Image: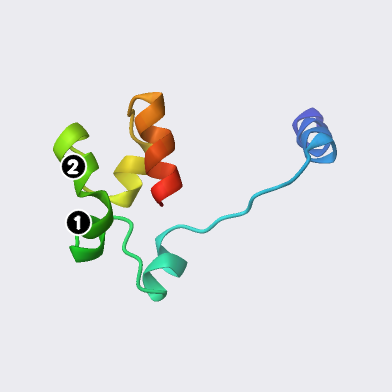
Amino acid sequence: MSEFNNAKALIDDADAILISASNGLSISEGYNIFAENDAFKKYFSRFTKLYGVHSILQGAMGKLPEKAHNEFIEQL
């Protein structure tokens, strides 16, 4: 029960809660977070050249330098 109380306290103290969904909702809307498709190449080819990033998921979750990661997320 202490884990539940700890989780509740964290939620109660939070300024906001972000709830997201992975590929099911994104793919149904036409966004493939796993693919190096034309849309990815159009917007993120610089990250492929500089850091070897080949998908939205890889760029968002990968270990990029902090400045590059921030730029990737801003572009996203």
Q: CA distance from mark 1 to mark 2?
A: 8 Å
Q: Amino acid at mark 1?
A: Lys
Q: Secondary structure at mark 1?
A: helix
Q: How many marks?
A: 2
Query: Is disc 1 surrounded by few (<14), some (14 to 19) or many (20+) residues within 10 Å?
Result: some
Query: Is disc 2 surrounded by few (<14), some (14 to 19) or many (20+) residues within 10 Å?
Result: some
Q: Where residue 72 sits in the image (x, y, percent)? A: 37, 42
Looking at the figure, which quarter contains the N terminus?
A: top right
Q: Residue at x 76, y 36 (%)?
A: 7
Report which residue position mark 2 lands on.
48
Q: Inspect this view and state whether residue 26 appears.
A: yes
Q: Which of the colour schemes (rainbow, by chain, secondary structure, one colour) is used?
A: rainbow
- Relative to 4, residue 20 above or below: below
Q: Amino acid at mark 2?
A: Thr
Q: Mark 2 or mark 1, which is nearer the start of the sequence?
A: 1
Q: Where residue 65 sits in the image (x, y, percent)? A: 34, 24
Tell whether 69 sits left or right of 4: left
Q: Residue at x 30, y 42 (%)?
A: 58
Q: Inspect this view and state whether residue 35 appears.
A: no
Q: Where residue 68 sits in the image (x, y, percent)? A: 35, 32
> On residue 21, which mark appears?
none
Q: Secondary structure at mark 2?
A: helix
Q: Where residue 35 sits in the image (x, y, percent)? A: 23, 58
Q: Residue at x 44, y 35 (%)?
A: 70
Circles 1, 2 touching at the beta carbon (< 8 Å): yes
Report which residue position mark 1 lands on.
41
